[in-house]
Image (spheres, rainbow, N blue to C red):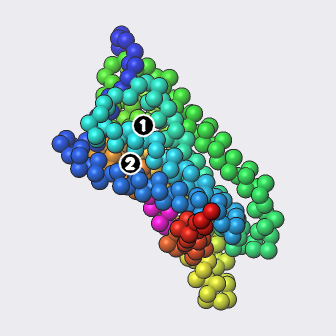
């Protein structure tokens, strides 16, 4: 262990190999972040405003919109400020908070996709018992469960990362505080933290993905047994939106965290897609492929534009 003073702040070096392109990147990324907030807020307001959407499926979709807005807001504002030319410094405490909430919200999203797959499995494979199985109490319990599991998962990763001493270099070769970028700065053996974080993220992703795979295998079998073509089309349309969103979420996780020898440039590009593009696409995926959401959204916009005079 190096004999030197503890680090009290870190310097975020930002996106590698983009020196001189900060203004262009700011102009490019700001609309993505704005669309993420606007799109997910629209979905949330639509779900809350429409009585027809007060069902388990849209309850979890509303939760997903909240998490997408929060997930992007963990990293994007600091990155945009840095691209504007403001200080790239981040305090030790803010770095801890950023890492915790990044993995907290990211893991909640994984759990939420799994819960949404179970909801679709129950709706399609057990339609007569759906209202009983997915009653409001169960839905709330599943939502709270995702919060608790996410908190445990993120607490383990944050504790392992920041119990290590940081007393040497403080330049983080990334645009936010994350485990692969922070561990090389620690002035102690990081092998345990690397193994546990790799296992933790990998195990969480694998278990959730297998549960989703089992659910959709059963769903596909049930859909193929539906006699009417229209019934099969509607069922596939609803489920395909969920599957597209799952692929957008799990692709970056595998690329960034489950590589034996991570590629920094590839990891940064994928992280930008995961932080900016993924949360922005979810409202488009669920809105464009769902007639109920489109109809409810049109009604909300119509009411906003036709406010009666007092």
> Residue beneath label 1, please?
178
The residue sitting at the top extreme is 3
Stretch in magenta: 279-286
> Relative to 260, is 61 above or below?
below
Say left or right for 82 vs 135: left
Magenta region includes residue 63: no
Prevailing SS of the magenta stretch: helix
**Which of the 4 image quarters holds residue 219?**
bottom right
The answer to which of 214 and 26 lies nearer the viewer is 26
- Farthest left residue? 20
- Near mark 1 (Cα within 10 A), the count class, few <14, some 14-19 or many ≥20, is many
Q: Position of residue 249 (x, y in %)?
A: 48, 56
Task: Say left or right for 17 vs 166.
Answer: left
Badge 2 element: helix
Give the left or right position of residue 250, taking residue 111 as reference: left
Coordinates of residue 8 in the picture (x, y in percent) = 40, 19
Local packing at callout 2 (Cα closer than 10 Å; few below 14, some 14-19, many 20+) is many
- Residue at figure coordinates x 53%, y 60% from the top left: 42
State the quadrant of the N terminus.
top left
How far apart are labels 2 and 1 at the CA level? 10 Å
**Residue 271 tag number:** 2
Q: Residue furthest bottom?
A: 228
Q: Is residue 237 above or below residue 55?
A: below
- Identify whether 308 is placed above or below 37: below
Identified at 36% across, 55% down, the residue is 31
Labels 2 and 1: the sequence-earlier one: 1
Q: Which mark is residue 21?
A: none
Q: Nearer the viewer, residue 206 or 16?
A: 16
- Image-quadrant location for residue 118: bottom right
Please tell me which residue lies in front, 256 or 275.
Answer: 275
Q: Quadrant of the C terminus?
A: bottom right
Residue 172 visible in the snapshot: yes
């Amino acid at each position: 262990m190096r004999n030197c003073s503890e680090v009290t702040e870190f310097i975020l070096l930002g996106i590698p190999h983009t020196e001189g392109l900060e203004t262009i990147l700011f102009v490019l990324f700001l609309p993505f972040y704005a669309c993420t907030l606007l799109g997910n807020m629209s979905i949330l307001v639509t779900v809350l405003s429409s009585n027809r959407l007060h069902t388990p499926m849209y309850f979890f979709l509303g939760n997903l919109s909240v998490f997408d807005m929060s997930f992007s807001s963990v990293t994007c504002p600091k990155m945009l400020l840095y691209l504007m030319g403001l200080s790239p410094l981040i305090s030790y405490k803010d770095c801890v908070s950023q890492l915790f909430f990044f993995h907290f919200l990211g893991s909640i999203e994984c759990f939420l996709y799994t819960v949404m797959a179970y909801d679709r499995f129950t709706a399609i494979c057990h339609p007569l018992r759906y209202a009983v199985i997915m009653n409001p109490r169960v839905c709330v319990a599943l939502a709270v469960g995702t919060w608790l599991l996410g908190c445990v998962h993120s607490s383990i990763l944050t504790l392992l990362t920041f119990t290590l001493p940081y007393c040497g270099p403080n330049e983080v070769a990334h645009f936010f505080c994350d485990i692969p970028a922070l561990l090389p700065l620690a002035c102690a053996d990081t092998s345990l933290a690397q193994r546990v974080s790799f296992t933790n993220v990998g195990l969480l992703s694998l278990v959730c993905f297998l549960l989703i795979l089992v659910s959709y295998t059963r769903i596909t079998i049930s859909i193929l047994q539906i006699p009417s073509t229209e019934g099969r089309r509607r069922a596939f349309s609803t489920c395909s939106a969920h599957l597209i969103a799952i692929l957008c979420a799990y692709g970056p996780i595998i690329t960034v965290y489950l590589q034996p020898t991570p590629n920094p440039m590839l990891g940064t590009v994928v992280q930008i897609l995961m932080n900016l593009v993924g949360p922005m696409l979810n409202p488009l995926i669920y809105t464009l492929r769902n007639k109920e959401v489109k109809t409810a959204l049109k009604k909300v916009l119509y009411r906003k534009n036709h406010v009666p005079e007092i």
